[in-house]
Amino acid sequence: MIPPIASKFVAGETPATALDRARRLNDRDVGAILNLLGEHYDSPGPAAADRDVYLSLLDDIAAVDDNVRISVKPSQIGLDVGEETFRDNLQAIVGRAGEHDCFVWIDMEDHTTTDATLDAYEAFAREHPGCVGVCLQANLKRTRDDVERLADVPGKIRLVKGAYDEPTEIAYTEKSRVNDAYRELLAYAFEHYDGGVAVGSHDPEMVDYARDLHEEFGTDFEVQMLMGVREDAQSDLAEEYEVWQYVPYGDKWLSYFYRRVMERKENVLFALRAVLTG
Ligand code: FAD
């Protein structure tokens, strides 16, 4: 069982805890995007095991009448083993999702994986229109080209600032430059995409900008935030817009929890307070 301190950011260890979290979010009109924690498997076995967990999770999701989607990491389902393994596992997951009318997001990892991830997204989204989405990172200089290239793909994009430290030759590293790139990409997507834009950010400025763009272009969009981050804002936004919460679960929660705590001073204080008060 995960300690109470980690349950701010992680739903629990089992699919049942994740589905329970999803039900409670749906009660607040917030959708749930479930992510089984796990990444960088260097042999086919663990990748196949996580694929099977996702297949069974999709069956469970289909059995409840809730707003629940899944999000998978390419290296969790075999990209480090090889592109073929990744595609085979993704094919199985997207195929099962298609049977159940469920939606699969593909997370984006570091820049060495971008081509393989986008190529797979494009292929599967064309094969299963309306069933697949992919994450794009504003910090990568290439993303402007990617956003243009993917405009006619029948899927969705989640625009994020980017979580990985990337080399300066290929990425913007200054915060203000990443923010400018985010705004430029969002504006392009709202102007050229036929819906299917997800604002994957906790930044009130980016969410406000998306509202302005929605008014200007009429493009549908959704907001996505992480579990445990700006929960009140998620509920408030859900009164007006489609809001989805990314809900991690599984027994590999420790490194994810550590990343969340360390990214923000307030979270370190929250963790210290929880430890001190038992
Ligand atoms: P930041 O630039 O970190 O912060 C901007 C402002 O947002 C802050 O000034 C503050 O006002 C507010 N804010 C931010 N965090 C908090 C907080 N904890 N509490 C209160 N206010 C806060 N990255 C990837 O590389 N690949 C992925 O697949 C991916 N998927 C993601 C999915 C979702 C749903 C989300 C929300 C993020 C994802 N990310 C992913 C992470 C993303 O790239 C950023 O690292 C992360 O979201 C931080 O950037 P930000 O836009 O939230 O704003």
Image (cartoon, rainbow, N blue to C red):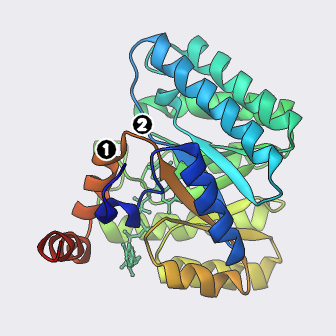
Q: Is mark 2 within 8 Å of ligand 1?
A: no
Report ligand 1 position as a quadrant: bottom left
Q: Residue at x 62, y 34 (%)?
A: 118
Q: Which residue is under mark 1?
A: 166
> Is 115 situated left or right of 166 in this image?
right
Q: Is mark 1 within 8 Å of ligand 1?
A: no
Name the image quarter holding residue 277. bottom left
Q: Nearer the viewer, residue 101 or 206?
A: 101
Secondary structure under tag 2 reads: helix
Please name the residue that numbered disc 2 is placed on.
Answer: 111
The answer to whether marks 2 and 1 mark residues whose Cβ atoms lie closer than 8 Å is yes
Task: Name the kind of residue labelled 1 in the image.
Answer: Glu
The one of 160 and 223 positioned closer to us in this rendering: 223
First along the sequence among labels 2 and 1? 2
Q: Is residue 113 above or below residue 64?
A: above
Check disc 1: other Cα within 10 Å, few if <14, some if 14-19, many if 20+. some
* Residue 112 vertical position relative to residue 60 in the rendered view, above or below: above
